[in-house]
Image: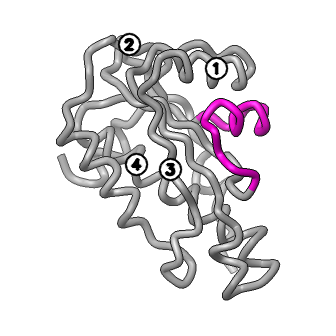
Amino acid sequence: MNFFELIESRRSVRAYSPAPIEPEKLAAILEAANRAPSAGNLQAYEIYLVRDAAVRRLLARAALDQFFLAQAPIALVFCTHARRSAERYGRRGAELYALQDATVACTFAMLAAAAQGLGTVWVGAFDEEAVRRAIGAPEAHRPVAILPVGYPAEQPPATPRRPLSDLVREI
């Protein structure tokens, strides 16, 4: 599958099979996230790999009772590490670049999962403090995205997208 076919076929999955993820597939996902571009190549983010079922249930509760999170065999929690970026870029690095770094890494992980036949969905609705407590992250790590990863137990249809004429502003 080429890149554009991958983009076209990726779906947000909210039902997962209990089948475990092969270690080599997980490694490929994490390596893809690690290869994501970042401001100044500082990689101002942390990835928490959550296998523990009890912690995934805590994440699901923290994510406003999105219980499909607990269904996936793995959840990746992407957190900013603002201090890494602030040392070079000051306030803009702390407030923006670290956020961009974490979200680009999450996107790379999402696409790497899809390329291997795995399902994901970007979860951004959650109580940050409850997520931080669930994963044992320090105050310096701000959770910005949760990515459940697993084999899909559903095949969601494509969702409608805005037409480019409504989305793109040519100057």
Q: How far across and how far down the image is residue 99, in percent?
A: 67, 61
What secondary structure is found at the residue carrying circle 2? loop
Question: Which dot, 4 or 1, sits closer to the camera?
Answer: 1
Reading the image, the residue beneath label 2 is 154
Amino acid, disc 4: Ala
Q: Rate crowding at label 4 as few (under 14), some (14 to 19) or many (20 or more) other CA atoms within 10 Å.
A: many
Q: Height in image: 152 above or below 163?
A: above
Instruction: Please give the name of the residue rendered at 30% of the width and 22% of the height, measured from the top-left corner.
Output: 151
What secondary structure is found at the residue carrying circle 4? helix
Reading the image, the residue beneath label 1 is 58
What's the mark number on residue 47?
Answer: 3
Question: Which dot, 2 or 1, sits closer to the camera?
Answer: 1
Q: How many marks?
A: 4
Q: Rate crowding at label 2 as few (under 14), some (14 to 19) or many (20 or more) other CA atoms within 10 Å.
A: some
Q: How far across and how far down the image is residue 49, in percent?
A: 45, 39
Mark 3 or 1 closer to N-term?
3
Report if the CB atoms under discs 3 and 1 are less than 8 Å apart. Answer: no
Q: Nearer the viewer, residue 166 or 117?
A: 117
Q: Height in image: 81 above or below 146?
A: below
Q: Rate crowding at label 3 as few (under 14), some (14 to 19) or many (20 or more) other CA atoms within 10 Å.
A: many
Q: Height in image: 136 above or below 61?
A: below
Instruction: Please give the name of the residue rendered at 67% of the width and 38% of the height, measured from the top-left corner.
Output: 124
Residue 6 is drawn in which quadrant?
top left
The verdict on residue 113 being magenta is no
Mark 3 or 2 closer to N-term?
3
Reading the image, the residue beneath label 4 is 109
* Disc 4 from disc 1: Cα separation: 22 Å
Q: How far across and how far down the image is residue 164, in percent?
A: 58, 55
